[in-house]
Image (spheres, rainbow, N blue to C red):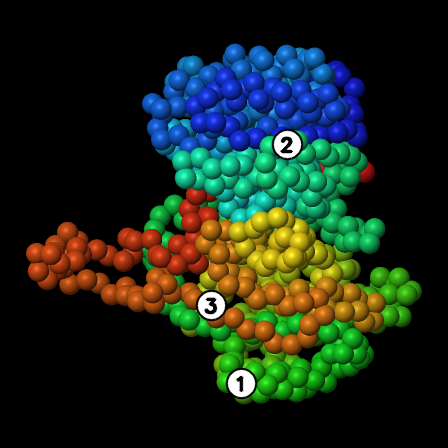
Amino acid sequence: MSSHFTQRPQISHYRVAAIQYEPTLGEKEKNILDLLRLAEDAAAHDARLIVLPEMATTGYCWISGDEIAPYTEPIPGPTTERFQALASKYSCYIALGLPEVDLATQVYYNSMVLLGPDGVVGVYRKVHLDIGDPRWARDGDLGFPVWDTPLGRLSALICGDAKYFEAARVAALQEADVLLFPTSWVDESCPSSWWMARAFENQLYVIAANRYGRERGVQFRGGSCILNPDGVPQAFLEDGEGIVYGEVDLRRCRDKGWVQDGDVIGRPLADRQPSAYRAVVQNSYLWEPLRYHSLYELGELPTGQLSCAGIVQLDLSSFAASPTAQPDERIVALQDWLKTQMRDNAPAAPDVLVLPELILPGPVPQRIIDSQDTAALAVHFQQGAIQIPGPETESLVSLANELQISMVLGVAERAGEDTYYNTVLLIDPEGVYGIYRKIHLSQVDRLWALPGDLGFPTFDTPTGRIGLATGYDVLFPETLRILASKGTDLVCAPAMLNFPSPIGLQLAHSSSFMGDDSGVNEPFHFMIWRTRAAEHNVYLALANWFGEAHGMQANGLSGIFSPGAGSLYTLSEVIADEDEEGLMMMTIDTREQRTGRRTTRMLEYSPGDMAGSLTGELAYNILDSIPGNLVRSKPMLRKRQPFWYMDLVRTNINQPHKG
């Protein structure tokens, strides 16, 4: 970028605007005049950074390249010159979405141009195309640029890019402060939970400018907004034309910490483990998933079935009332509690049951919290750690056998002299079937445990392919991306977390949830667990503690989330309240076809032969088909663009700003 942009003094606190507009398809001059009017209004009200919607100059729903051709133009070009004059007049920056033509190739792109007082700052071309884009546009070929400006480091995504965590993550790793987000969003109520996830997991401001209205049968959702780095909207406009204003404070987004009650309790970038992420840059769903996962001696994915997944949410103050109790005493208490729950819920019973993190040895005693003695805290977990296998795991296996279920739970593990891990066990009636050692360590974990050394393993069961993680691991989207790439159906995640809290919205209308007298209340509009399940097309069963005891706090909100939740493929989910103790269950479906019929036997005729009569069925091999069940087909993985994701596995990338 030319130096005249960086010579301007940096502004650390400034006003921003997202413009919501309904372009008229093909009426380019009308749209441009409207957009200039709205942008000037925002600039006159002191907005220093203004974002306009995707394809704002032309409308979005184009049938072909031939149809859109008369409305495309290069960057810079006649339209950008008009908006740049406005940026110069008001000393502001304007992000504009438009169809771009590359004059050298005559290829079209769905693009965004960032204009400043001195000209074009940069161009972004949409990388993850939505279903209508390939009718006329090519995938973006400029990666995910970050531009230094007096307003901080700015980056951009367009619409469907936000459904792929890798895009915003690359920008964050390149020290972006603000994400410019022109969009034509159609799924769910807006502001979208997917936008909130991108802000929360990267601690970025997001300026989302969406269109509204209906075009060629497609309903756009509006909801333009300014999102804080924690994902909470400063302001939003549910529907209609208008300008949404907000504030950016660069100091807030550069700390890159998850904050609870004023304390940093995690770091979304610093706590990453890039050396464990190699699978993120591999394109495992480029091929038909059933054939890919059956290669070599690996065998096929497990058959899958209708199963019952269960989660247990426990009260810290009741179950964990005696932090000095020995492991065998805690196991006896767990046995009694589970037997009561199973009896009370009969005849329903889970096939797989997930319990919270660190059941053994339990929470930290209050005296250690009060003394802020980190050495004593480490001793608490290390002295309560168990060996695997050992007498404690034998007791747990006996319990699984008695109940005839598989159990997933968290323990402190002693793996050798001075070697301890925060570990998740998969226990079935025959023994310890799976072990995962926590890779993303929290600040408390680091006082006593080492990062896990087993990677992200999966385990095949009658329920399906199971992946293990902890709740803190799931906050890092790389975790579930790796497990999903291995064909995981169900991720089981014991947790001990007091954050994040759901973000609710009060709306006038909605595509989901429940209404009340004053409109539509969506108390769980954003839950990071729901987004995680949907963006990786897995079931996620997360079991958390709740309450407060012995200096520990947890916010409950355990749940079972579906592989298409929060999208047009909305499926069922179960969410516990913040203060609800008990066993909750949900049916999950891991069959290839949701009709339930499945065969992978070799056909007795060659592909292309006709079976039966002349009007019979055309022969095919099921391994060459795409499963009809989201959890097996994983469309979110098929549409990734790993070529652009290499920064996610670099260990020497620039460190984020601190303070």
Q: Which mark is residue 346?
A: 1
Please rate how many residues cluster around mark 1, counting C-alpha atoms within 10 Å: few if below 14, some from 14 to 19, many from 20. Answer: few
On-image quarter of the C terminus: top right
Residue at coordinates 83% horizontally, 67% vertically from top-left? 551
Q: Nearer the viewer, residue 386 or 255?
A: 255
Q: Can residue 387 be seen here?
A: no
Q: SS at mark 1?
A: loop
* Residue at the disc numbered 2: 242
Question: Looking at the image, is mark 3 or mark 2 nearer the viewer?
Answer: 2
Residue at coordinates 51% horizontally, 37% vertically from top-left? 213
| Comes first in the chain, label 3 or label 1 | 1
* Residue at the disc numbered 3: 588
Residue at coordinates 56% horizontally, 51% vertically from top-left? 510
Q: Can residue 135 be seen here?
A: yes
Residue 514 relative to residue 603: left or right: right
Q: SS at mark 2?
A: strand
Q: SS at mark 3?
A: strand
Q: Nearer the viewer, residue 449 or 193?
A: 193
Query: Looking at the picture, how far across and down is residue 646, in whole percent?
Result: 54, 38
- Answer above or below: position of 529 versus 223: below
Q: Which mark is residue 546?
A: none
How far apart marks 1 and 2 lie (CA) works out to: 54 Å
| Comes first in the chain, label 3 or label 2 | 2
Residue at coordinates 63% horizontally, 46% vertically from top-left? 196
Q: Amino acid at mark 3?
A: Ile
| Comes first in the chain, label 1 or label 2 | 2
Q: What is the quadrant of residue 374 in the picture?
A: bottom right
Please rate how many residues cluster around mark 2, counting C-alpha atoms within 10 Å: few if below 14, some from 14 to 19, many from 20. Answer: some
Q: Nearer the viewer, residue 442 or 168?
A: 168
